[in-house]
Image (tube, helix red, strand yellow):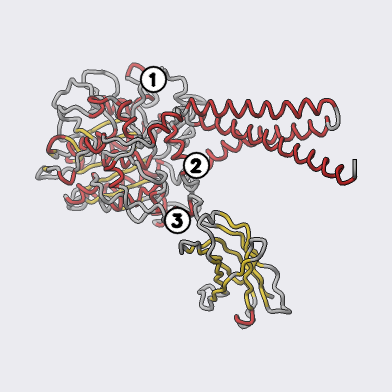
Amino acid sequence: MSKVSNVLCKFLFGFGNVLMVLFAALTILAGASTLWVLKTWPHLTMQELMFTIQSPVEGTNKEMILDYIVFCIPVTVIVMAALIAGLVITRMKKGYRIMAAAVPAVSVILLAGTVYTAWERLDIADYAANSGAVSSFIDENYVDPAGTELTFPEQKRNLIYIFLESMETTYADEENGGAFSENYIPELTELAEENEDFSGADAGLNGGTALTSTTWTAAALFGQTTGLPLSIPIDGNSMDTQESFLPGVTSLGDILEQQGYRQTFMIGSDGNFGGRSLYFTDHGNYDIKDYYYYQSQGKFDKDYWVWWGFEDQKLFEYAKEELTALAAQDQPFNFTLLTVDTHFEDGYVCGLCGNEHGENQYGNVLSCSSRQIKEFVEWIRQQDFYENTTIVISGDHPTMDKDFCEGIDDAYERKVYTAYINSAVTPEDPEWTRAYSTFDNYPTTLASLGVSIEGERLGLGTNLFSSRSTLTEVYGNPYINQELTRKSELMDQLTEEIDIDNMELKIREGRVPTVTATALPYDFRTGVLQVVIDNIQNADDGIAGITVAVWTGPDQSNLQWLQAEAQPDGSYIANVNIPGFGFATGEYYIDVYLTDNMGNQNLAGSTVGYVE
């Protein structure tokens, strides 16, 4: 064998080993990631997975990201290290042939198992079949509030709407309609049973079902106040990239604003996340009181941050102050707040939490939340404004905690906690145990304020105080969920103003061109600061040209534009003429813009050069 052939054989041998190790490692990573996803979200659907994958990392709980890293990365690294060690030890020996044959075969089997598991657990075939189908269900059953007669009482009632993060009726004991042997939410159970949860003659708790496209917080808030699913052509938490939030929809906030209500939305996290601030601002002109608002008010130190912002203990403290101020005004108010301590994974343990459930942290946090809600409601009841105020308490969606509900019988129907307190009306049939979804909260909340609703329906919801059947009672939730996954002409119409080419959205989704810009050391002999532009990504519409913006001062007063020149290797070079900047020393700020063949110009990269 010639020397060249020998080198080539060694190269191919080494390259084959590298591919084998990488393939095995990626297979292990894919399998571990699939197991982690299914462990973290046991009841995950393909639609929810697509939403989660597309959602921005910003605003995600850092503990969840760390949990993924701890679960998936070590095992992948260990497998890679073991394979490399095995290949080195068995190199040129009989054992190497066994490894060379076994590793790819086992990797293929594991990969096939991963794909099969995901296919079956997520029902991908059904998702694919329904995603392209068209349904008239929403179009035929939607009742437009803008064209429905609503009659308010002469003295308008105040509304306090409390969204409880991940709160289910499931957390109660079996005796009270829950799924556990012990009651994690005794105070909330008492509130629902003493007031109205539409359980009728049934002694157990009753709640609403979170249907398709209402099972994450932004969608839950939207669904309960519009009677519609948040079925949009972008991921569900990217509405903050838009200029408006479905302006063609008439929401609870829109109706109350027209009736002169002063409205507030209060949360202990970033209101912008998921477009929540945009929604409540666009639909009801709510005052947004979020983490950053209270930070600006000096309520806590600038660097204070726990869980998703600040804990519910502070939320209820601030809520009492806000309600006192609202009640002192002449106009009726709608005060809406969202808790956060019971978010997955395992919730946030605050200073008020006990240890009544031992090492069961999520159980302790749920019980703590239950006590805090009861104390808050009792405080409200002691205020002068309570007599003319309706309180609605509703979970936003079922929990995403990976294991808390793991042992529950699949036949048990998990529902969102619901309670109407001090309603202006009572059910027409108090013995009727209603089957309902969170869509029904929309007209039911208005009815609880004493509003008369023509036809007793709004959106896809039905007034539960009336004797009219809900869509759940007519069609059943499995059928409705199937229809909600399909395309709807009405939803297409309502979402047509969503700008899928919004620059912020394109950046978030990785749909804009990117480049790597590198400023080389300044050449004082030529007076040139050379910028190399390469590693061009996502330029699917071609490259018409690349321009470079350069400046030295913070106010960009000496901004200059340069045309970069294409190089044979596919890179681009821009030469910054330093004499043109008066030989200014220090930092040179450089932005690179790529113009595609469609005429679109995007900021693709930035760098900083230095001139001594």
> Residue 278's spot in the image, x, y percent?
34, 52
- Residue 504, numbered label: 3
The residue at which mark 2 appears reads as 61
Q: Is residue 259 left or right of residue 588?
A: left
Amino acid under label 2? Asn
> Residue 18's spot in the image, x, y percent?
74, 39
Q: Nearer the viewer, residue 150 or 351?
A: 150
Q: Crowding near pointer 2: few (<14 within 10 Å), some, many (20+)?
A: some
Amino acid under label 3? Glu
Give the mark nearer the N terminus: 1 vs 3: 1
Marks 3/2 in contact by CB < 8 Å: the verdict is no
Q: Is residue 102 visible?
A: yes
Residue at mark 2 to residue at mark 1: CA–CA distance: 27 Å
> Residue 501's spot in the image, x, y percent?
42, 55
Residue at 13% x, 35% y is: 455
Q: Is residue 121 above or below residue 513?
A: above
Residue at mark 3 to residue at mark 2: CA–CA distance: 22 Å
Q: Is residue 98 above or below residue 260?
A: above
Q: Nearer the viewer, mark 1 or mark 3?
A: 3
Q: Nearer the viewer, residue 382 or 529?
A: 529
Secondary structure of the residue carrying tag 2 is: loop
The residue at which mark 1 appears reads as 179
Residue at 76% x, 37% y is: 17
Residue at mark 1 to residue at mark 3: CA–CA distance: 44 Å
Q: Nearer the viewer, residue 215 or 339?
A: 215
Residue at 31% x, 45% y is: 492
Q: Is residue 314 above or below residue 346?
A: below
Q: Is residue 50 left or right of residue 29?
A: left
Quadrant of residue 515 within the rendered picture? bottom right
How many labels sit on residues? 3
Q: Is residue 373 visible?
A: no
